[in-house]
Amino acid sequence: RSLQTSCSAGTNSLPRLPTSGASPSIYKAHSAQYVNVKSARYRPPGYSSRGSGVTAPPRRDNRRRTQLTPPPIAAHLGSPSLASPDDLSAHSEAGLNKSVSSILTDDDVTERLPHHNKSLLGARSDSMASVYSGAGEGRYGSVIVKGEVEFGLQYNYKQGALEIHVKQCKDLAPVDTKRQRSDPYVKVYLLPDKSKAGKRKTRVKKHTLSPVFDEVLKFQLTLEDLECRTLWLSVWHSDMFGRNDFLGEVMMSLENKVFDDPSPKCYPLQERSEILDELICSKGELIIGLKFVPPEDSSLSSAKKSSSAAKGSLHVLIKEAKSLCPVKSNTVDAFCKAYLLPDKGRASKHKTGIIKRSTSPQWNHTVVYRDVSLEELSERCLELTVWDHDRLTSNEFLGGIRLNLGHGKHYSKLVDWMDSSGKEILLWQQMMERPNFWVESCIPLRSSLEFSSPIKS
C-alpha cells in the first residue's frame, strides 16, 4: 500500500480508467459510443459526444480536382476572414501556372511535329536561301561593295581537281549599319555551269566584317575543261529569311591559266559584272564543217547537167563542242544528234559516239546526206542537238543549232524550224555558194529549240 500510494502521488499521468469488468470493456472505453466517460484526452474540432457518435470529417470531393478554372480571387477578397495570405499566394500561383500552361501549349504543338516535317522545313529554307542568293535573284545594290577577298588556286593532278583555298575577307560592307557587322560567306561557280551541282560555298561567319574562312573548295574537272571556264567568286551576307545581300564578287577567266603558285592573293571585290548574264545564259559552242558535193559529170547526161535538180550529197563534219553546261554534275557524257528537216525519220537521224566525262568533247564524226540538191537544201534545215547521256533516266538536252536560210518558210508554207540567224545563216549560205569546199564555223548553242513535234534522243 505504501508503495502504491507513493507511486500514485508521484505520477502526473492522466487518471486510469476502471480496471473492473471484462477485457473487452477496456477497448470499448476508448469509444464514447459504448462508455459515457469524460476524458481529458484531446478531441479534434467537430467531435461530438452525443449519441450519434463521432462525426467523420467531410469527404473531399474529387471532382474539384478536375476543375480547370480556379475560383476568382475577388470572391475571397470580399470576405476578409477567407482571404488569407496563403490563399492569395495559392491563387496567384494558379494564375501564373495557367498562363505558363497556355504558352507551353504552343510549344508542345511545335515539339509534337514529326521530325521529318522539321527537316523538310529546314531543307526548304536552305533551298530558298540558295535561290535568292543566285545570280540575278539576290539583293543587289542594297549594300555598297567594298573590301577584298584573299584566295589561292591550285590544281591537284592526282585527284584531277581544281582546289580553291578561300582564306579570308577584309573590310566588308556592313549590312547591319547600326552594329557595324555582317554574316558573310563565300560562294563559287565555274561558269557557264550555274547548276546546283556546280556550286561550292563556305560556312557562314557571324557578326564580322573581316571573316577568316580557311576552307578549300574542290571542283572535279580536267585541265582541258578548265580552259573554257570562268571563275565566279562572290561574297554574300546570310539573311535568316533567305533574302541574302550581295557584298561583292571576283571574275577570273581560267583560259590559259597556269596553276604554279597556290599561295593566296588578295583581290578587290567588285560590283556585279555585266558579263555575268551572258556567261550564265551561254550553253557552249559547237564547231561544225559543211560541204556540198555535186554529182559527177560523167554520170550525168547533157540534159541533167543543165538542170538545177541535179542530185548531190551534203557532208557534215561534227568536230567538237566547247564549254558545255552540265545539268546534273560537273561533267557530261556528251553526244550529238543530227536531222535534216523536215524529215525526222530514221533515214534522217544520225548520232555521234558518246564522249564521257568532258564538257569539251571532240567527236570528229562525219555524216553524209545523199540524193539532195542545192534547190532542196534552200528549203531544208540541218538541226544539230547536243545531249548528256544517262543510262537510267532520259538524256538531258544541253543545247542545239539550226542551219538554214532563215526565211521561215518551207515551199511557201510557214514553219517554225526555218528560224536560223547570224552565224547559222552565214554558214549555210557559204556551203551553198562554194560546192566541193569545206566551210567551218563555231556557233553558239541555243538554250532551247521549239520542236514542231517531239523528238526522242
Image (cartoon, rainbow, N blue to C red):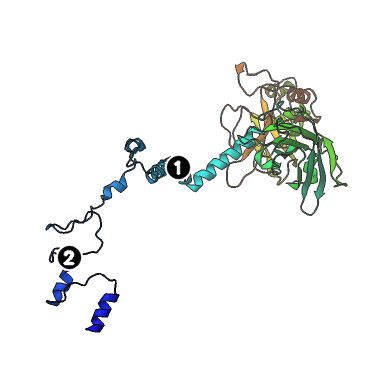
- Residue, x 74% and y 30% (percent of image)? 276
Q: Nearer the viewer, residue 377 or 88?
A: 88
Residue named by callout 2: 31
Quarter holding the N terminus?
bottom left
Q: Nearer the viewer, residue 94 or 55?
A: 55
**Picture coordinates of residue 139 (x, y %)?**
67, 28
**Picture coordinates of residue 420 (x, y %)?**
69, 23
Label 2, label 1: how many angstroms apart (C-alpha)?
A: 51 Å
Residue named by callout 1: 100
Direction from residue 444 to residue 342 in the image, left or right: left
Q: Nearer the viewer, mark 2 or mark 1?
A: 2
**Picture coordinates of residue 211 (x, y %)?**
76, 41
- For badge 2, the amino acid type reads Ser
Q: Give residue 40's quadrant in the image.
A: bottom left
Direction from residue 125 to residue 35 in the image, left or right: left
Q: Earlier in the sequence, mark 2 or mark 1?
A: 2
Quarter holding the C terminus?
top right
* Element assignment for label 2: loop
* Element assignment for label 1: helix
- In the rendered structure, find residue 30 and report the number of the disc placed on it: none
Mark 1 residue crowding within 10 angstroms, few (<14) / some (14–19) / many (20+) = few
**Picture coordinates of residue 21 (x, y %)?**
11, 76
